[in-house]
Amino acid sequence: MSQPIHDDRPDALRRRLLGAGAGAVALGALSGAALIQAQGSGAFDWKRFKGEKIEIFLVKSPRGDLLTRFHKEFEDLTGIVVGSEMVPEQQQRQKAVIEFNSGNPSFDVIALSYHVQKRQFAKNNWLTDLRPMIADKSLADPALDFADFAQGGLNYAVEPDGRVNSLPLNLDPWVVYYNKELFDAKGIAFPKTFAEMQDAAAKLTDSGKGIAGFVARGLKNANVPVWTSFLLGYGGSFIDGKGKLLTDSSEAIDAGKMYQVMLGKYGPPGVAGFNWNESQSLFLQGKAAMWLDGIGFAQPLEDPTKSRIVGKVGYGVMPAGPKRQVSALFGDGEGISTYSKKKGPAWFYLQWASNKMNQTRMLQAAAGAPVRNSAYAAAQSSSDFKAPKQWVECMLTSARIAQPGLPVISPVTEFRDVFGVALTNMINGADPAAELKKATADFQPVLDKSEKA
């Protein structure tokens, strides 16, 4: 039985967000309050699975680095031995599908990108429903505290049928990092609109000095969230309520033209091969004036062992498009493989990974936007809090204007592949309207087949 089409138009999104406010939908048959009560109270036996070993499959990122750094803490707490693998996100996604399809994946716990893997994993039943463990007083630490999770994170973690297949870790609104030194040298203020953004990129591009006015992902597949960031500002959407793609609309074409100009005209040489890591490298070397990507990259930019622009980085909210000011939103979490024979120890790991201490550490390290509300108060009251104040303000403002940056569909990887090719072609001079019409025509049958499956 197919799941319902997700209508991505703004009015439908608002209705869903308003309708989810009470939290009952977010945790299926058990409301947030009931789950908290079900966890009970008193001492929790973290040593229950002492001597077991679990395998964790993470994405190479500031969040993955942070968790890996503290795995010894989890081992000391529980007596559970952790083996872990951490690879770049594209390879992780490919390997996850191969291993799940084998019926015998090498991992017990897997990090997932909700915007790419949530629906795919759910339709294939690759993740364990956590609700029985959440409700079991002997398995759920009272400090799990679902009331502390932001509603947006809970909405990501739950399926339309009520299954809770993961615990959320990070929300990732997209922002504009900018080089304050380059802006100040030319007397340019941070742009408030798309038009000002384009004008600033033109003025700050200096090919003689190897300075790009703008950098972002140009690589096929990875580049789609850059275009959708513009699309949302132009007032566009992905799919209507009947499953028809809206990706060749006038708004989508205008966003394609914006993408073409910003990367093709003001981007660095070879940008069609850039993912986030190449973009980050260029920016931290001081060779790009603006970089559009997720909020979780302040840590390397402010690290003097990696960055040449420490103290010179500005953190800007996505400028307003002609119709709306929107930050494209993505999210990450962790789930337990359906095939795991060590679901108990794996569940203990999920609880530890998403606990209040690790969420506070994430914010303190500027490694991402935690899903726990308590992390913000705890981090900012700590003497160890080193994240730039502007970064925190940018993150909170961006979260308030955030909307999903990709359609919630099962073949989202194919969506990114098809439209990613179109966008890469635009960088090389192809007509945006023609490319988007072709991509839309090519992908509509894929979407239709998926929804009927």
Image (spheres, rainbow, N blue to C red):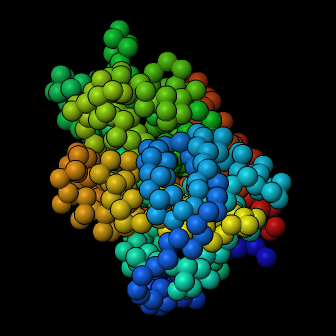
Question: How far from the left and from the top, in percent, is residue 36?
Answer: 44, 85
Q: Against 305, is 58 above or below?
A: below
Question: How far from the left and from the top, in percent, is residue 302?
Answer: 29, 35
Total labels: the figure holds 0
> Which quadrant would residue 343 be assigned to in this image?
bottom right
Depth order, front residue of 31/409: 31
Q: Against 172, is 306 above or below?
A: above
Q: Residue furthest top?
A: 208
The answer to whether residue 307 is seen in the rendering is yes
Q: Residue at x 52, y 86 (%)?
A: 137
Q: Against 14, is 308 above or below?
A: above
Question: How far from the left and from the top, in percent, is residue 299?
Answer: 34, 40
The answer to whether residue 110 is seen in the rendering is no
Q: Residue at x 42, y 66 (%)?
A: 355
Depth order, front residue of 82/353: 82
Q: Residue at x 29, y 58 (%)?
A: 396
Q: Against 156, is 27 above or below?
A: below
Question: How far from the left and from the top, in percent, is residue 435?
Answer: 65, 38
Q: Residue at x 48, y 85 (%)?
A: 39
> Is 208 left, or right, of 351 in this rendering?
left
- Where, quadrant-wise, is the N terminus in this rendering? bottom right
> Which quadrant would residue 410 be assigned to in this image?
bottom right
> Is 421 left, or right, of 103 in this rendering?
left
- Where, quadrant-wise, is the C terminus in this rendering? bottom right
